[in-house]
Amino acid sequence: MNDAISNPSSLTRQGMDYGETSDVQEVHAAIQREKREPRVGLEPLSIWLIAVYGIAIFTGGAYLGRYSGDFSGNGLDPLGGPPPAKKGGGAQGQEQQVELSPRDRGKKIFAANCQTCHQSNGQGVPGQYPPLAGSEFTNGGSRRMAMIVLKGLQGPVKVKGQQFGSAVMQPWDKTLTDQKIADVMTYERSDWGNNASPVTAEQIAALRKELASHPESFGEQDILGAPDEDIPGGAPAGAAPPKPGEAAKPAPPPKP
């Protein structure tokens, strides 16, 4: 009995059918020869596929950078701006972009900020918003008009013999720059049959400093109490306004 037990060849492996005799090393060797099944979605990408993707992304970026259609951030400016210079040779490429005049710039500013109330024809809205066409404030001296634009106008006001209600004009001193106020006033004083003197940014800057201690909007009596004259430093009526950066030439003294 002891001899039968000590003989390893007669032993059966645990977990195997009775009567099977197999070496453990042979079983492990067979298992190790088997390859693992690949997990779906985690297979490595081919190096050629990575190269193709990289070339496609590089080519697309280079194309968009070169053929962007001359897109510029100025196209999103509601007040408009000079179009970007086009690249290329020839006569068109050598021509410089013509700078907009103060009147043309003022027309864009008017359309973006003032046209809703005063209308594109400058006639205003009867009983609500006074007209600018033929208005005594628009055609008079630039001081009264600039006071209204800078600080606003509250309360009833009479324009061209018609009475208009309250809250006529909001102040623009904290919204528009000196140059933009000068440009829009120059446009309003030279369109719809108006023929008043142009306004410069230097004039508006001087009046802004003068009115710095007046925080509230003006009433009709305040405007009529101011002298009906141009702000010092401007050009006479009918004269071309100075170019940006140039000082305005003083008006010639009146002839005796």
Image: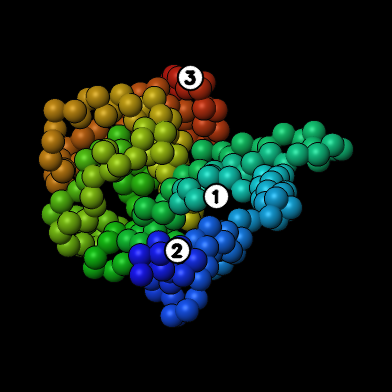
Mark positioned earlier in the residue sequence (3 or 1): 1
Picture quadrant where residue 207 is located = top left
Q: Secondary structure at mark 1?
A: helix
Looking at the rendered structure, which numbered label has been put on residue 7?
2
Mark positioned earlier in the residue sequence (2 or 3): 2
User: Looking at the picture, which amino acid does disc 2 mark?
Assistant: Asn
Q: Secondary structure at mark 3?
A: loop
Q: CA distance from mark 3 to mark 1?
A: 30 Å
The image shows residue 24 at horizontal and vertical percentages of 49, 61
Question: Which residue bears the numbered disc 1?
Answer: 75
Q: CA distance from mark 1 to mark 2?
A: 96 Å
Question: Where 218 falls versus 242 (above or below)?
Answer: below
The image shows residue 226 at horizontal and vertical percentages of 21, 35
User: Looking at the picture, which amino acid does disc 3 mark?
Assistant: Ala
Picture quadrant where residue 65 is located = top right
Q: Quadrant of the C terminus?
A: top left
Q: Secondary structure at mark 2?
A: loop
Query: Of tags 2 and 3, which is closer to the observer?
Result: 2
Q: CA distance from mark 2 to mark 3?
A: 120 Å
**Is 134 situated left or right of 26 in this image?**
left
Looking at the rendered structure, which numbered label has been put on residue 239?
none
Going by the picture, which residue comes out furthest to the bottom?
18
Residue at x-position 22% and y-position 40%: 151
Question: Where 188 falls versus 127 (above or below)?
Answer: above
Mark positioned earlier in the residue sequence (1 or 2): 2
Q: How is the image coloured?
A: rainbow
Question: Which residue bears the numbered disc 3?
Answer: 247
Query: Of tags 1 and 2, which is closer to the observer?
Result: 2
The image shows residue 171 at horizontal and vertical percentages of 23, 45
Q: Quadrant of the N terminus?
A: bottom left
User: Looking at the picture, which amino acid does disc 1 mark?
Assistant: Gly
